[in-house]
Image: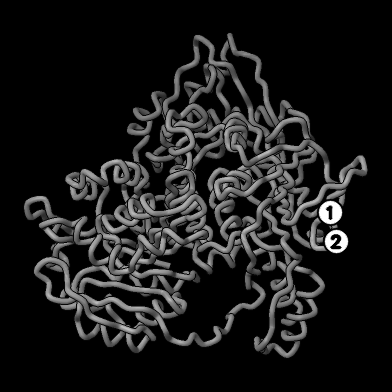
Amino acid sequence: MSSTTSASSIKWKSDTPFSSTFNDIYFSPTDGKEETDYVFIDGNKLPERIKFCSGTFTIAETGFGTGLNFLCSWLAFRNNSNSNAHLHFISVEKFPLSKADIAIALQKQEVLKGLSSQFIDQYNTLSSGINKFIFDHGKVRLTLIFDDASKGYQRLNEHVDAWYLDGFAPSKNPDMWSPELFQQIARLSHPGTTFSTFTAAGIVRRGLQEAGFEVSKQKGFGRKREMLIGTFTGKQKQKTIAKPWFELPRGDKPESVTIIGGGLSGCTTARALAERDIQVTLIEKEDQLATGGSGNRQGALYAKLPVKPTNQGELHLAGFLHTVNKLKQLDPEQTLWSQCGVAQLATNEKELKRQQELIEHGSYSDELVTAKSAEELSTLAGSRVEHSGLFFPDAGWVSPRDLCRSLVEHKNIQIQNTSITTTEYNNGQWVLTDNEGNALHASHLIICNAELANQFEQTSHIPLKPIRGQVSISPVSESSLHLDTVICGEGYISPAKDNLFCFGATFDLKGKERNVTDKDHAKNLHNLSQVLPEIHSAITGPDKPQLEGRTAFRCSTPDYMPIVGPVPVHDSFTETFGKLRKDRKWKFENVRAEHHPNLFINTGHGSKGLITCPISAELLTAMICDEPLPLPKDLVDTINPARFIIKNLIKQAI
């Protein structure tokens, strides 16, 4: 995983961006779109291939630059695809352009203006690792990796249909055109995968031929004499699965899916599936959606970042950026959320030191997070703030309850209110029995009911722990001061929604009480007094309003990471991999993981559901539909449901 990402240093030659780092232009000064259409769109014969595509067509690129190639591909897809087709565009960029520079570079591409404005609105620069974008109601997806090309593609495990070998000329940037890159290109290709590139340099031609491509030359664009095109014909060696217990089962895209659980996990998953034209039955035991941990009036939307990037930090950052972009599309008027920014305060010396180290380490861009003094944060908040801290300008608050209701407003989603007690696989389908003895049938089943997800026989081995939390709710009285941004300290408080402040929440590992308690109100008020004394005084003053509240139980896991993926057959895993581990030597030949057929789980999001549920829903949907995964394989493995079985086996062998 890349820990830092450097911005590209560019100059302008008329309206054409020019890289100072590589002494080369980003695209043709005569007509950038025409060049892209000739070299990449036509070079890979995309229009005719897309016309007959009934699944996902995947394009991978080696240099994102201004995003021109992506936008041209998006337009070509729109003009040529049928209703069943989807486009997944993957690109890497080691030196990303700023949002402002991309806007300038694309401003004269009139035919792309509608698409470019949508892209620029979602674009977040200098966030190292994976960035996910969704357009056209899920028909078009962009995975943008800010990293070295070969390193970026090492983390993926996709099936690429066409390659755009772009980037600066081999003479200007020889490090990118490396044997390691060609190896990754071959690994991700299949017989029939095509490529095209503007260059005809020998290092590129020989590298591709050695990797298994049949290469030919054709006339280059404009004044360029030649370019290369080709097709992958190499015989792929059987890949050795490094961790067979994390192997994902593969199958055909289903016509329908049943989901148990109507909180954030279930509703985001239902929406992701529905956008693939899959019929979804969402089963919720209560009369309304989001009655558990997803039922709060407001939740803080931001990622608490580690000083140095970690798997958990990368998942949270990727999830945060994905959620923000999803909300921009779902609710551009911000009726159920607000991008008002979030201040994460340093309320003690330990946190202050951590924040200083985070800024000094330089892993995150100023566009994502900046350090602010107490005075600066007071100005941003509109009320006196007691501590310095970090400010996330693109963050804010979301109403999880309202979001769930909005997500299920889709023609392909139907809701059924009943309580499922048992699940059994019989005659090629799942039979679900409710508390009245009624039987429901499903070809594919996803369990999303939080801490109750391990109540079924197939999931009983999955470790989950409920953590009690209570939020306090106070009316905005005449003496209350307004608040313009979310403030996070030991707890959080959001700007008022419908003239009500929502603040909290307590974190009780052993709590079982389901009613609102005065003790927890007192905790929330104390935490509020430490960060926003004026608002605390207004809420607790002589004309103090009556506090209301709400309790719920977050569903957490032993490693505080969500559980997302296919459900393993516990006894089979234990027997298969336990035998291999007895002599402390793993032998993987012909070893395969066994999973319950078409059974998946999505739970354990704790207090991070707003940033991990939407990206997990996309991941699970990609698994079920056999699409390219929106996260790198090492992150997918980190949240695989089988990880706890393997950890236990390793402990037993030590």
Q: Which residue is mark 1?
A: 431
User: Which percent across, then down, holds residue 110?
Assistant: 21, 43
Q: Quadrant of the N terminus?
A: bottom left
Q: Is residue 197 left or right of residue 1?
A: left
User: Which percent across, then down, holds residue 344?
Assistant: 45, 41
Q: Is residue 55 left or right of residue 4?
A: right
The residue nearer to you, when weighing 203 against 625, is 625
Give amino acid for label 2.
Asn
Give amino acid for label 1.
Val
Q: Which residue is mark 2?
A: 426
Q: Is residue 333 left or right of residue 469?
A: left
Q: Bin the neighbour count of mark 2 within 10 Å (Cα to Cα): few under 14, some 14-19, many 20 and up.
A: few
The residue nearer to you, when weighing 55 against 240, is 55
Q: In the figure, residue 638 lies in which quadrant?
A: bottom right
Q: Name which residue lies at 50% across and 37% down.
A: 488
User: Which percent across, then down, holds residue 53?
Assistant: 47, 61
Q: Is residue 531 above or below residue 110?
A: above
